[in-house]
Image (spheres, grey):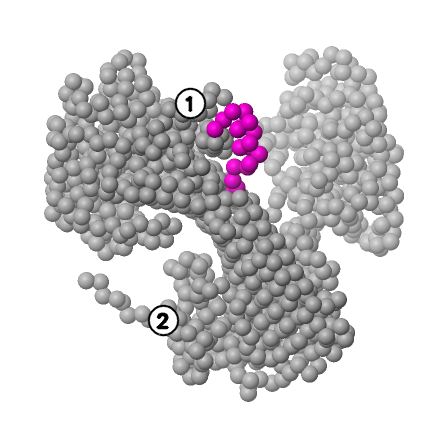
Amino acid sequence: MTAQPQKIQTQAETSLMQQFAFLDLEPSRQAAADRLNESGLPHRRVEEWKYTDLRALLKDVPQLASAQSVVPTTAGQPLVPADFVLAVVDGIPQDLANAGANASDAAKEAVSLEIGLGDAKGFHEKPNANVDFNMALASSGYVIQVRKSAVTPIIFIDHIVSKADAITAACRHSILVESGAQAILVERFSGPEGSAYVASSGLSVIVEDGAKLTQARVVAEGDQSSHLATIGARIGTDAIYEPFVMTLGSHLVRTDVQITFDGEQSHLGIRGATLVKGKQHTDMTLDVDHASPNCTSIEQFKSVIADEAKAVFQGKIMVKQIAQKTDAKMMSQGLLLSENGEFLNKPELEIFADDVVCGHGATCGDIDEEMLFYLLSRGIPHPVAEIMMVQAFVAEAIEDTEQPEIIEAFEAILADWLASR
Amino acid sequence: MLQIKNLHANVDGNEILRGINLTIKPGEVHAIMGPNGSGKSTLSYVLAGKDDYEITEGEILFKGEDLLEMAPDERAAAGVFLAFQYPIEIPGVATMTFLRTAMNAQRKARGEAELNTPDFMKIVKQKASELNVSPEMLKRPLNVGFSGGEKKRNEIMQMALLEPTLCVMDETDSGLDIDALRVVSDGVNALRNSERGMLVITHYQRLLDHIVPDVVHVMSAGKIVKSGGKELALELEENGYADFVNAA
Amino acid sequence: MPAIQETIEQVKEIDVDQYKYGFVTDIEMELAPKGLSEDIVRFISAKKDEPEWMLEWRLDAFRRWKTMEEPTWARVDYPKIDFEDLYYYAAPKSAPGPKSLDEVDPELLETYKKLGIPLSEQAVLAGVEGARVAVDAVFDSVSVVTTFKDELAKSGVIFCSISEAVREHPELVKKYLGSVVPTTDNFYATLNAAVFSDGSFVYIPKGVRCPMELSTYFRINEEKTGQFERTLIIADEGSYVSYLEGCTAPMRDENQLHAAVVELVTHDDAEIKYSTVQNWYPGNSEGKGGIYNFVTKRGDCRGKNSKISWTQVETGSAITWKYPSCILRGENSRGEFYSIAISNGKQQVDSGTKMIHLGKNSSSRIISKGISAGRSQNTYRGLVSAHRKASGARNFTQCDSLLIGDQCGAHTVPYIESKNSTAVFEHEATTSKISDDQMFYCQQRGMTDEEAIALIVNGFVRDVIQQLPMEFMAETQKLIGISLEGSVG
């Protein structure tokens, strides 16, 4: 009685499928492409994409840039002084010859860099459309390995889209921080204004036993672009992973972060700040799997929404039955600066172990009138007071970062954003 | 300097101030006493320009200008300072940042040059030490985690830094022990001069032992029901507010 | 705290592993044939002497239902229901609408006794003067006794079965039925619209404060009978009513489906307080035989300053799928949701609320306490949303989960959607277990594990218990103890 309706492909789906057909994909990439072919782009009826209907929002998937078409370019000024400066142009990793020009011998000793497609072990096993999109399209990236050493090397990767006409830029990196090693990874994503390019980025992270990785990412893509990113990380025993994602650019941003605790006594501190205006749509979707006992995690996210922009936060904390003594705290807060902004928030707890302390908080509203009045009563003009309030709101998340240089860089970006509003 | 004429104000449709008349001349210290709910705090908020109050009648002239026409920050720049009964906590804003922003904003509004950092630091450190405000407190977010006494000292320190011409203090003595009360009062007294007017709002007479007023007003049910010299405060301490409340 | 003392004593008395209310009443039943078709819908409508418009309404819903699919988004897992293998109509053969209690089947009265209906209400049924609770007792599908109608009528309150309302007050039913939960709303609500058997109808006229609390007891009795209650409560301008709903069900081997719909409407300055204690049969220790409870409850705060407050205590059913919600349409309207959801054994609960802020300065408050024990899964799922025009909307949500044992799950899935900058939402959720220190302290004072748990859990849910009408408070405290039996050791 109910005939299956003919599925209509969107422009983006059609061009994606056509490109898949032309690419000669090896089996794991083909499997990801097949899954996307089968399901199409995710839409609002898929729970994980309820607030970000990719099928409706992604207008097109332009031609994938290839190594042949890319004009070699060097990285811009790093966000913070770095030992290694790497550039990815239109999704293609650039030559490593001068990457470690500023690195000390100790740092050079600790870090090995290669161009290629590393493993994707950091991601969760269950299929995810964003991961599949990247897996199918990305053909290269950096494979980074950090060995135990007396130093904490800083690696900066600058993702640049160089072409003014719309392209698809896809890459996937992997970083392995070996037992007892420490590293800082700083990333920036940028591209031309006015171009409807698509940037797909994947990052697989392994933090081994006793290791520590600090990560700072700034997403400042061009205003008409779509940025689809995934970070998948596995954390070993006694290990620490502290990423921060600052999102301000792009027309459409979806970042999927998947974390798995593989060992005990480890800590995750993931934070983020989202600054949106105009008609931007940003989505931070976090899936933390406490699969081991005695671990702690802090998830703290701030969203500042101006104009008609929309910010989405979805954060799931899963505590498996084995993960006794888990301590997980998530906080997601939205600050709406204009009447027509939207903040869509879905913090989620899924708990199967009883001896745990887990919680989440979520707030949203405009600038607190009492606080604002206090500032005004001290003679601070309204616009300045508003900026102070926004800075204070975001600062709570930024300030927990350990590296002063990173804090400074983030604060400068925030100040610029506020000034440009 | 300050002239309040037949001031009526509503909150959510309830009339709280019902015809206040009050004149403060330069150099004078006025105290307003009265029972809870008499409208004392409302008067202080109306002077500072808080949004929630609707002025239905009357006017306020400050140095001859219409205060009610001015935005809160303009009033502050013009020299009106309110020491809050409950200073607001603002997480994420360092006290030092706040002070510098406020000072420079006011200087800018008055057409003065901004203070450079060393000068600013010097002034803050000096005022802070006078009011027993530790350098550690200045680094913390504004009023967050401050004790009641620390918050009040911070208010008076701001008053000293910003050098207003009209100081309105709303229940500055509440929550203070004897020692803190002395520190705060000394800070206030140090600011007394022939140019500056002060309005001290309090429930108890004890603050007025330390900050001796020129004029004492009794407020009840939104009106000033009696005015007199400092001895009026003592009289109130003795007999309570009952007579005045009934009179109103 | 004497109430808690009482709980402990109750717990002691309970015969473990025996569902207290698991008995079968032997009353002759009249059944429609199994399965669902237009003919069955016509049969039900005809049995109830319904006018043509009502039949059309049902048929319309039935046709829609045929095109719909069972929802699968809730975190519940159960074998697929064969909707063709259910009876959609069952009525006791005794004549409906007895004029006095003498006409009531004595077995029915015996049933109420076993149900442990509070003494005051038994007194009402026994005709004792001065008892002040009206009971519209629903025995399976047909209302068989309604008390205090006269006294209610004096104040203009209409409290009757919905079948009677269809006949006697068609203008009210036409105006309000399906206006809060449309026939197209969801799979179960649409099914209900097609085949609802009976339920309660309440109308409180302008300015009337209902002189007593209205109370309905539900019973599911006949094997394989889907129970499709329909309740409609309208509080006109400036009126107030408190409505109590309590349920028990007999032990059965077959799963039983229950898909009720409750619609509430409040006009300007009106208030409805709706309280539920649900302790239907949860299934045996293997999870077999419990009730499937798929309920749609929604209130529409249509008028300014109107208020709807849901309080629920959910301890029973094998599966609970239930989200009592408020549409806050009126300016300054207020919605409240207070919930205790206890799951044990293999129970699955997916419950919560929706607070839809449409009106200016509308406010809402959600307090949810979930307790999971045994091998149960307990999910809070809630939506708070502020639409563009809902300036000044406020919500406060507190969701706490307590886990007892390491074989169960507690889940929190809130959706918080703000499309207005002046809306202020605050949400907090915690998950924890009963601390060993608390347990030890209680044990040191001489309590058994189960007594200690009952005591501590009663403390954990206190904020919600306080919202319950007096009649339900003590019963609920007992129920908590009963529900958590066998959760330790």
Which residues lie in the magenta part? C430-448
Asked where in the image residue C474 lies, by quadrant, the reply is top left
Residue position for label 1: C9
* Chain letter belonging to callout 2: A
In this rendering, does residue B73 appear at all? no
Total numbered circles: 2
| Residue A404 visible in rendering | yes
Residue at the image point whose x is 72% and y is 68% from the top: A149
Relative height, residue C369 to residue A273 (above, below): above
Q: CA distance from mark 2 to mark 1?
A: 60 Å
In this view, the residue in front, A141 or B244, is A141
Measuring from the top left, give residue C191's x and y in whole percent: 24, 47
Q: Name the residue rendered at 58%, 32% in the picture.
A: B11
Instruction: Name the residue furthest bottom.
Output: A68
Identify the residue shown where x is 76% and y is 16%: B237
> Per the image, is C444 magenta?
yes
User: In this rendering, do the residues under marks 2 and 1 share a single chain?
Assistant: no
Where's the N terminus of chain A, which quadrant? bottom left
